[in-house]
Image (cartoon, coloured by chain):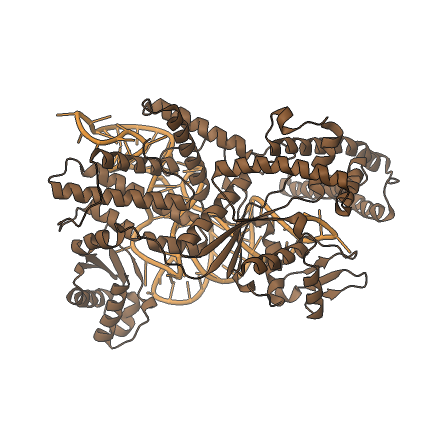
Chain colours: A brown, B orange
RNA sequence: GGUCCCAUAGCUCAGCUGGAUAGAGCAACAGAUUUCUAAUCUGUAGGUCUUAGGUUCGAAUCCUAAUGGGAUCACCA
């Protein structure tokens, strides 16, 4: 549409002797209720035309109509200049732009971008939240590739730490040598089972300790530091409770707030008390052994991790996501200390008397942040500084996207700020693709309370639902068993993926497991169905792509589809710039809807003549191609039949 | 308490860098198939765009504040 903008700039120069920047010409799609396809808002130009918006619009419109052969007509409604481009123009777009194989294939832009996503812990299976992460990451990578970037997909696996030791210890204590083979459980689920078991046992041990604290005021199990903290917490709790009981019942809001505060303080007591359970003490010892390279512990760790990886591989395959490179925290957790040294020399960091290293970010509106413990060991951000450097050294990417949930917004703000202050290469290309949590009707998912929606279970359920729905329609009776299974998978996953990706990433998402994801309306299967429908017509007509057809006039519904098709490259660019699969999802829905309307109003196989029939077949084939491509950017397959 | 994010139809969501009478889907109701796949299409009904100010010719959109919801503020990751 640049040619219209250029012409409009010329028009204003010619008519009003004023230079305006091309960006000042606000082109927008004409609303459905008006005639035309492109609209220019004329209000901004009345300043130098010194005429009313209607007259200004008329003058510009007349200029454009005279100068551009593509402009067939125009009309003015208030300050809006609605331009109708000629059918010849739109038909030309279909033949010259959309139909060729390189439509919407961006030229490589020479930029390399890394997308890091998934980043699982190896102590439990993936859940619904991970699904959102994986689908987002994969889709964003596809979109960036389609926009011309050289994309590297990376998975940073959190394969070490206290949480893995919990699973390991529980397995040692209660596992009796159980393996995925002996139990028939998927590896990640087996390890997750022991993680849950650990927590259960921990709770058992915790109860008597807490009783001693609260009922007998006995703090003898704790060291001095812990005693001090607990003591302070107990006082705080007592105060809050006194305040709560003194509050009249009518003040429900205040009582609620106090109750929340009390439970926060009680949780802190719990956290401290956990550390003196024999279970936690043993877990800590195990972690120390792991870090010291104890052969037996390392062996167990390797074995259990291998179970988990086998399980993850299956889940990833079912999700349809993949990675170009894996990083493991067991290899990277010691990194970053040289960066701390560098930062100290550059005076970006400072050392406290106890030896701990900090950065003061108060001038940037943040807090002081610890970057290295007083005992010289790494914290989370130390590692992340190190891995950021490692990844950059490996790939020298221009941009780096971290797909991580919004609970880590603060962490990434700090991380990026530090890398900036250190003047690190690539620091300007860092971006945290922060997405909202997936909530259940009951609230937040909590693995400890068993309210997580397991990824594997959910995908199976989706497939089953797809099966039930499809069979009820009786359309697949002629399918082979194999084709049926493939179709159920395509539809079930399509419904799930579309459901999760059509929403703006930063918004939190409500997922109701009881109300299975819809298959009608604004859904993946709706779009898949449109594709299958087109393919069916094409195969009936034995359609072959062929040369230009002599056609001069378009029906409204045909033009609408072409207009949408021409927007695809722009939509890809927008989605890439905003890192938003939702933009693609909403676009392809509009396209499918527009096609279905055309399909209903115009017969293809029974078209008035052969030329028109061929034209409509070409329009249909183009629509199918774009639908398939757009869905591919979301990681969703489209079936040939359904 | 500080900081960040979110708030649009009963429900789930669109609404791009300010522009026309705020749009879809689901749910409800009424229709369309002797014709290419009815997982479709057409129509009816449903709104104080959380509230109050401000900027502007013009605000769902930008600014400020309030309210509600969420996240975060560990020598955890």
Q: Is residue A173 visible?
A: yes
The picture places residue A104, in percent across and down from the top left corner, at 33, 53
Relative to A168, A396 lies left or right = left
Seen as rendered, the residue at the extreme bottom is A17
Q: Is residue A196 left or right of residue A614?
A: right
Location of the N terminus of chain A (image quadrant): bottom left
In the picture provided, is A121 more to the left or to the right than A222?
left
Q: Position of residue A323 (x, y in %)?
A: 52, 46
Image coordinates of residue A144 in percent, x first then y, are 43, 53
- Extreme residue toward the left, this view: A609
User: Splitting the image into 4 quarters, where does residue B40 fall?
Assistant: top left
Compare residues A251 and A486 and report the one nearer the observer.
A486
User: Which quarter of the figure has residue A531?
Assistant: top left
Residue drawn at x 28%, y 53% as measured from the top left: A566
Q: Which of A34 and A615 is in front in this view?
A: A615
State whether residue A194 is above or below residue A323.
above
A446 vs A520, left or right, is: right
């Amino acid at each position: 549409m640049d040619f219209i903008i250029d012409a409009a700039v010329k028009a204003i120069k010619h008519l009003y002797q004023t230079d305006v920047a091309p960006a000042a010409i606000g082109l927008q799609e004409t609303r459905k209720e008006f005639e035309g396809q492109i609209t220019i808002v004329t209000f901004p130009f009345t300043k130098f035309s010194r005429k009313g918006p209607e007259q200004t619009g008329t003058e510009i419109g007349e200029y454009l109509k005279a100068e551009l052969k593509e402009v067939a007509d125009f009309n003015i409604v208030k300050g809006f200049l609605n331009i109708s481009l000629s059918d010849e123009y739109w038909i030309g777009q279909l033949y010259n732009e959309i139909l060729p194989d390189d439509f919407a294939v961006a030229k490589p832009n020479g930029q390399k971008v890394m997308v890091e996503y998934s980043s699982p812990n190896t102590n439990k299976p993936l859940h619904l939240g991970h699904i959102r992460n994986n689908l987002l990451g994969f889709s964003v990578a596809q979109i960036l590739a389609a926009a011309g970037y050289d994309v590297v997909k990376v998975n940073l696996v959190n394969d070490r730490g206290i949480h893995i030791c919990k699973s390991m210890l529980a397995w040692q204590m209660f596992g009796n040598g159980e393996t995925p083979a002996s139990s028939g459980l998927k590896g990640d689920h087996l390890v997750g089972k022991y993680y849950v078991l650990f927590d259960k046992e921990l709770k058992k041990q915790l109860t008597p300790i807490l009783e001693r604290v609260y009922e007998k005021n006995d703090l003898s199990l704790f060291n001095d530091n812990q005693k001090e903290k607990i003591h302070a917490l107990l006082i705080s709790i007592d105060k809050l409770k006194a305040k709560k009981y003194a509050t009249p019942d009518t003040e429900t809001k205040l009582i609620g707030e106090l109750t929340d505060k009390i439970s926060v303080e009680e949780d802190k007591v719990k956290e401290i008390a956990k550390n003196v359970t024999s279970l936690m003490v043993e877990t800590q010892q195990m972690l120390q052994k792991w870090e010291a390279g104890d052969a037996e512990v390392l062996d167990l760790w390797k074995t259990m991790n291998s179970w988990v990886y086998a399980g993850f591989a299956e889940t990833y395959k079912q999700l349809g996501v993949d990675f170009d490179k894996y990083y493991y925290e067991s290899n990277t957790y010691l990194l970053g200390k040289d960066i701390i040294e560098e930062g100290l020399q550059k005076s970006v960091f400072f050392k406290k008397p106890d030896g701990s290293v900090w950065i003061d970010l108060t001038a940037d509106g943040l807090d002081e942040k610890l970057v290295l413990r007083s005992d010289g060991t790494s914290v989370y951000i130390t590692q992340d500084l190190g891995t950021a450097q490692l990844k950059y050294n490996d790939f020298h990417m221009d941009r780096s996207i971290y797909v991580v949930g919004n609970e880590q917004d603060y962490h990434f703000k700090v991380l990026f700020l530090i890398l900036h202050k250190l003047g690190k290469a690539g620091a300007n290309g860092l971006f945290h693709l922060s997405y909202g949590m997936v909530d259940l009707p009951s609230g937040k998912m909590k693995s400890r309370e068993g309210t997580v929606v397991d990824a594997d279970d959910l995908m199976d359920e989706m497939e089953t639902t797809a099966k039930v729905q499809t069979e009820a329609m009786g359309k697949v009776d002629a399918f082979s068993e194999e084709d049926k299974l493939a179709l159920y998978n395509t539809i079930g996953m399509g419904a799930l993926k579309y459901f999760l990706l059509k929403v703006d990433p930063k918004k939190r998402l409500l997922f109701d497991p009881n109300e299975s994801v819809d298959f009608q309306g604004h859904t993946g299967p709706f779009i898949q169905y449109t594709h299958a429908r087109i393919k069916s017509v094409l195969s009936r007509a034995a359609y072959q792509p062929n040369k230009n057809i002599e056609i001069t006039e378009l029906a409204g519904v045909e033009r609408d589809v072409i207009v949408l098709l021409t927007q695809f490259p722009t939509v890809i660019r927008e989605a890439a710039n905003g890192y938003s699969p939702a933009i693609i999802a909403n676009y392809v829905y509009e396209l499918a809807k527009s096609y279905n309307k055309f399909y209903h109003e115009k017969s293809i196989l029974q078209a008035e003549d052969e030329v028109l029939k061929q034209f409509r077949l070409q329009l249909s084939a183009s629509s199918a191609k774009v639908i398939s491509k757009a869905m591919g950017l979301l990681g969703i397959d489209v079936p040939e039949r359904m």
